[in-house]
Amino acid sequence: MMWERSGRVGVTAAVGGIAAHRAAERGKAVYMEERIKTEETERNLRECHEVQQCEARPRAAWEPVSAGSFNVFLLFNLEAAWDEGHCILALGPVDGPLETYSYYRHSTKLEAPGIMACLRDPMTFAALEQASGWIVHGEPGNWWNEHVNCAIALVCDEVSFNGVRAYAEQRRQHPGTYNLVTYNCLTFCDDALRAGGIRLTARLLKSGKIVICKGCENAVREFSLYRWDDRAQGQDQVRKEHDHAMDEIRYFAATVAGKEGRGGVFAGCVERGRF
């Protein structure tokens, strides 16, 4: 009996040692995964900053704007969402205080209730620059620091500004459902611009900064299928169907083609269904 008892103790100790070893190995794996992700994030940010330095338009080259004009900014946090980035809408009179609208979700699921974060205290774009892109964002009772890495600046008149702001305020009051694919932070910003008559993609297509080649069969097909949504109850928005390529073009317009740079050519191709 004593032998059996000590045998059981030995087995229990061995099992406990194996469990501890496995736990330690899992801990090492998690640590290595986080370390690799951190290094990847730092590398991506360095590359993004290098690109920004090349593409950034010097202040001396900024075009003067007429009195009474308004700014619409697309602010980008390149570190958010595991380096996928986040787009924030910022509105205000030229050189005046800005209001921000950051549409997001508290979930890792594809679809979740939408939430709108705004600046705790209005700030000018000059103040944003002085703060190195740091802002205090959120909603009453839930504020946090957020870092803005780059921005696209648009200028519009009061009529367009009011249209963009009205759409943003409506979404703030009724956030609806955030969907990572069909209605996300960038979709919100693009629809807000459209509500003010600001069509970034159309402007870039018209100016020749974006060219759709004959081989882009899905893009050509979806252009012919793009339709305004008659069910949108007076809202200026398109139907969310047959628009995968269109969404890709809109994202490219906002994140690459819409930035002021030194010129050049960008060509890209991704085989559909590859990922």
Image (cartoon, rainbow, N blue to C red):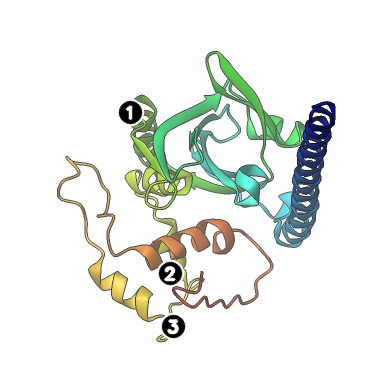
Q: Is residue 47 above or below residue 147?
A: below
Q: Tell me which amino acid carries mark 2.
A: Leu
Mark 3 or 2, closer to the camera: 3
Q: Which residue is under mark 3? A: 213
Determine which quarter of the picture holds residue 75.
top right
Q: Earlier in the sequence, mark 1 or mark 2?
A: 1
Q: Is residue 215 above or below residue 198?
A: below
Q: Position of residue 90 (x, y in %)?
A: 53, 36
Mark 1 or 2, closer to the camera: 1
Q: Nearer the viewer, residue 265 or 33?
A: 33
Residue farthest along the top direction in this orientation: 141
Badge 2: residue crowd in 10 Å (few <14, some 14–19, many ≥20)? some
Left or right: residue 58 versus residue 233 is: right
Q: Position of residue 136 (x, y in %)?
A: 64, 24
Mark 3–mark 1 distance (CA, rounded to whole Å): 39 Å
- SS class of the residue under badge 3? loop
Q: Earlier in the sequence, mark 3 or mark 2?
A: 2
Count every numbered label the image shows and give the total: 3
Q: Tell me which amino acid carries mark 3.
A: Cys
- SS class of the residue under badge 2? helix
Q: Which residue is under mark 1? A: 174
Mark 1–mark 2 distance (CA, rounded to whole Å): 32 Å
- The residue positioned 30% from the left and 76% from the top of the image is 221
- SS class of the residue under badge 1? loop
Q: Nearer the viewer, residue 180 or 46?
A: 180
- The residue positioned 75% from the left and 31% from the top of the image is 131
- The residue positioned 38% from the left and 64% from the top of the image is 244
Task: For residue 112, say whether it is visible.
Answer: yes
Determine which quarter of the picture holds residue 172.
top left
Q: Which residue is under mark 2? A: 205
Task: For residue 77, say whether it is visible.
Answer: no
User: On the rendered image, what quadrant is the N terminus found in?
Assistant: top right
